[in-house]
Image: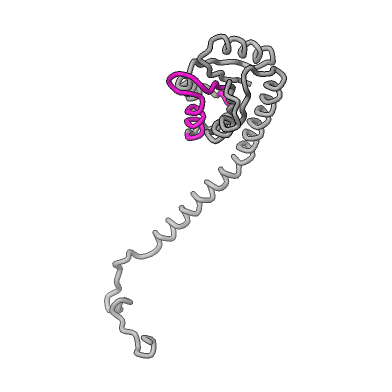
Amino acid sequence: MGILIADDDQDIQHLLGRILKSWGHDVTTANNGQEALDILKKAPISFVISDWMMPKMDGLELCRHIRSSDFGRYIYIILLTARDAKNDLIHGMESGADDFVVKPFNRGELKVRIRAGERMVALKRDLVDANDPIQHAYDRFNRDLEAGAQMQRSLLPPPDFTVPGVPTMRSQVLPRSLKN
């Protein structure tokens, strides 16, 4: 799986990149959230590990931008940060992160959290794939329904159509018994 590392610390990028590659992942790096967002717009990456504190765009802003954008795929986000207060965890998750790992990180913990994220991404992809034929059928049904309605409308006379000598509904007077 391709994983994007967004961190302004080159040492963390190198260390994390080496670890992820040893686990079989393709790694792309970004120095800040804006650079990461630009990469996500161009590359089909579905997994991001982001530092919280970065220049230009921090990890929380990156999370919010990812969640408010339509990439056509789900992007799983792990915030990797030295911030470890409960409020930080809550704030990070409310910004759109899926998981939260505190620096210095434990390799085993990071590995199982990545595995959990991979399962989530795979489940989301499977769900989209399973819903795709249903969506196509729904779209075709709506097109057919609209074509049928258009055909019916074409068979009706125009609203201002009149037959000479036949009163229109607007000109007819209702009997007194039907008025009440």
Q: Is residue 102 placed above or below 167 in the rendered structure?
A: above
Membership of 51 in magenta stretch: yes
Quadrant in the picture for residue 175? bottom left
Which one is in front, 101 or 133?
A: 101
Depicted 88 relative to depicted 139: above or below: above
Residue 75 on image: x %, y %? 57, 29
Res. 49 in view: no
The residue shown at (65%, 28%) is: 117
Which of the pair 168/55 is nearer the observer? 55
Q: Nearer the viewer, residue 63 or 41?
A: 63
Which portion, as a residue range, is magenta? Answer: 45-68
The quarter of the rendered structure image containing the N terminus is: top right
Identify the residue at horizontal 46%, vertical 53% (top origin): 146
Point out the residue furthest to the bottom here. Answer: 177
- Residue at 50% over, 28% down: 60
Residue 14 image point, x, y percent = 59, 9
Expressed as whole percent of the image width and height from the top left, the position of residue 86 reads 60, 32
Q: Is residue 101 magenta?
A: no
In the picture shown, does residue 53 fall above or below 168? above
Left-right relation of 13 to 106: left
The x, y position of residue 161, in whole percent, is 30, 68
Q: Tell me how the rendering is colored.
A: one colour
